[in-house]
Amino acid sequence: MKKKMKTSDKQNGGSKNKGLINYPVGDFLIRIKNTSIAGKKTVIAKKTSLIVDVAKTLKKLGFLESVETDKENITVKIRYQNKQPLLTNIKLVSKPGLRIYKSADELEKIKKPTFLIITTSKGVLSKDEALKKRVGGEVIVEIL
């Protein structure tokens, strides 16, 4: 006897675990990208320590106006210049199935005019900060 699926279950692929995210930091970064392309200013997401650190790094780099946290959520405001968002082209480098690690020497060889955000033993850093501290780590995202 087959169990009949509800319409809401069909829309969610039949999954009973609604709202679970496989890669929270990737989801957060793509939300920022989509929000800025849509011309909106604010993104609210579930808070994790990695997401907070990445958001703070993006604020240091000048892509975000503000980062606010409460018990469960993080709220970020995207920075605009001349009515255009500064953050529109984000490329996830590491993914759950394939993590990409770079040493300090490998980071030094990257000459593209992009920003990299890297998780290191010294915390979440931009490529320039990682090179100053001579540490490598997992490359999370590339901002073009």
Image: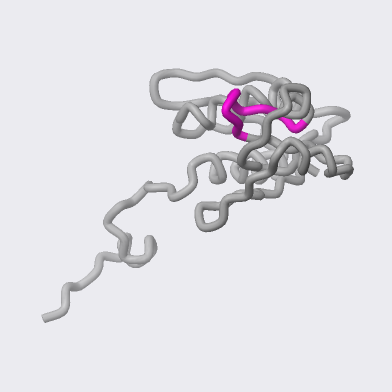
For residue 29, what is the image quadrant?
top right
Residue at 72% x, 39% y is 39
Residue at 56% x, 39% y is 28
Q: Nearer the viewer, residue 62 or 78?
A: 62
**Which quadrant does the C terminus fall into?**
top right
Q: Which residues are magenta?
A: 119-127
Q: Residue furthest left?
A: 1
Q: Nearer the viewer, residue 3 or 105?
A: 105
Residue at 57% x, 51% y is 99
In the image, taking residue 86 as reference, residue 72 lies left or right, namely left
Q: Residue furthest bottom?
A: 1
Q: Which secondary structure dominates the residues rendered in magenta?
A: strand
Residue 42 in the image, given as x and y percentages of width and height: 61, 30
**Which quadrant does the N terminus fall into?**
bottom left
Residue 68 in the image, given as x and y percentages of width and height: 55, 18
Residue 45 in the image, given as x and y percentages of width and height: 49, 34
Image position of 59 with respect to 9: above or below: above
In the image, taking residue 26 as reference, residue 139 lies left or right, namely right
For residue 120, what is the image quadrant?
top right
Residue at 88% x, 40% y is 113
Q: Does residue 122 belong to the magenta stretch?
A: yes
In the image, taking residue 81 as reference, residue 56 lies left or right, namely left
Residue 78 in the image, given as x and y percentages of width and height: 69, 29
Q: Does residue 77 belong to the magenta stretch?
A: no
